[in-house]
Image: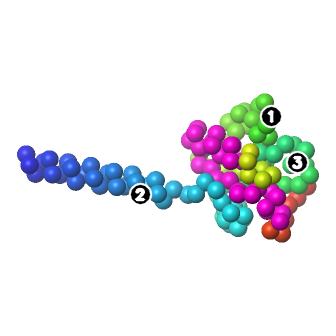
């Protein structure tokens, strides 16, 4: 009986340590401009601009789609995203994309956003398209 209790205790410890390890190795939610650029280059995520259509039309990252975080139907736009594909979010300076990040992660999406947003992207000399 003592052996059985010891085995159960060891298994419980191993299981909880694996859970903690899984939590600590999770990808960071906020990415620097360079890390965001690398994530885009890897080509394994959906790039989403959460600015207004007017902001998007003035310039955006190539390959991005526009889901306006401030629109009444933003939920419908996000619902169309494939949950199995990670999402890279950006906005003008990081505020709206951080809110969208919280919204998506609460619903089970894997998402990250760019610290400093499109303004930081441009300041770093990176390209955009119209």
> Residue beneath label 2, please?
21
Q: Main secondary structure of the magenta part?
A: helix
Asked whether the viewer can see residue 82, the reply is no
Residue 108 image offset from top left, x and y in percent: 56, 41
Assess whether residue 103 is covered by the magenta stretch: yes
Q: Residue at x 92, y 52 (%)?
A: 58
Look at the image and give the residue range highlighted in magenta.
97-123
Q: How dense is the environment of label 3, judged by Cα within 10 Å: few (below 14), some, or many (20 and up)?
A: some
**Residue drawn at 81 percent across, 45 percent down:** 51
Q: Which mark is residue 55?
A: 3
- Report helix, strand or loop for mark 3: helix
Q: Residue furthest left?
A: 1
Query: How far is the residue under mark 1 from the one under mark 2?
Result: 38 Å
Judged left or right of residue 82, residue 68 is right
Pointer 1 local density, CA inside 10 Å: few below 14, some 14–19, many at least 20: few
Check if residue 55 falls in the magenta segment.
no
Q: Residue at x 75, y 57 (%)?
A: 116
Q: Which residue is mark 1?
A: 71
Quadrant the N terminus occupies: top left
């Amino acid at each position: 009986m003592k052996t059985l209790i010891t085995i159960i205790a060891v298994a419980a410890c191993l299981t909880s340590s694996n859970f903690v390890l899984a939590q600590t190795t999770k990808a960071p939610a906020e990415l620097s401009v360079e890390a965001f650029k690398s994530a885009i280059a890897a080509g394994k995520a959906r790039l989403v601009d959460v600015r207004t259509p007017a902001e998007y039309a003035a310039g955006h990252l190539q390959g991005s789609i526009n889901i306006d975080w401030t629109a009444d139907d933003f939920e419908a736009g996000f619902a169309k995203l494939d949950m199995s594909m990670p999402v890279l979010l950006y906005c003008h300076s990081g505020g709206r994309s951080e809110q969208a990040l919280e919204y998506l992660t609460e619903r089970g999406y894997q998402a990250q956003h760019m610290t400093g947003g499109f303004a930081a992207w441009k300041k770093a000399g990176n390209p955009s398209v119209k």
